[in-house]
Image: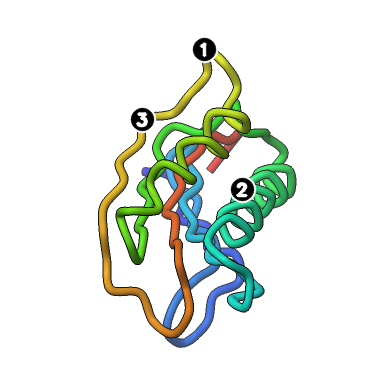
Amino acid sequence: MSEIVRIGAGKRWTDIVVYGGVARWVEVAENTADDVRGQIGQVLRQLDETAAGLGVDRRSLLEVVIYLADLRDAPTLDELWDAWVVPGQAPIRACVGAALSGNLRIEVIAQAAVAGG
């Protein structure tokens, strides 16, 4: 059995969990004062940054689950996503509406293939 690696483990959650060659993590916008377009852009950049820290890139994404505070923002998400995702290398993706806290407009759960783990 592979070892579970927890990066940034805290009392309530862990920043990244790696198991069986798959890293799992959550991204939310750091600046919630931004509008939905700004928050989506932040989250996409953060996905890139976290993946790079794991030694991979967006082509290694396996699955992305996106929670939007308002599903009417889905067209904005799709526009930015389509410009961001690598053609022919898109992960599986789901997008659902959710009651997010504060002024959060988007929350993302990501899984990516990584070496080791």
Ranked by sequence position, the earlier of labels 2 and 3 is: 2
**Gap between marks 2 and 1 measured at Cα:** 18 Å
At x 44%, y 85%, the residue is 102
Q: Which label belongs to residue 92?
A: 3
Q: Is residue 99 above or below residue 95?
A: below
Q: Quadrant of residue 86?
A: top right
Label 3, secondary structure: give it: strand
**Residue 13 image point, x, y percent:** 44, 76
Q: Is residue 33 left or right of residue 117?
A: right
Label 2, secondary structure: give it: helix
Q: Is residue 101 left or right of residue 83?
A: left
Q: Amino acid at mark 3?
A: Ile
At x 56%, y 15%, the residue is 87
Q: Amino acid at mark 1?
A: Gly
Ranked by sequence position, the earlier of labels 2 and 1 is: 2
Mark 2 is surrounded, within 10 Å at the Cα level, by few (under 14), some (14 to 19) or many (20 or more) other residues, namely: many
Q: How many marks?
A: 3
Q: Which label belongs to residue 88?
A: 1
Please name which of the two marks, 2 or 3, marks the residue nearer to the observer. Answer: 2
Residue carrying label 2: 44
Q: Amino acid at mark 2?
A: Leu
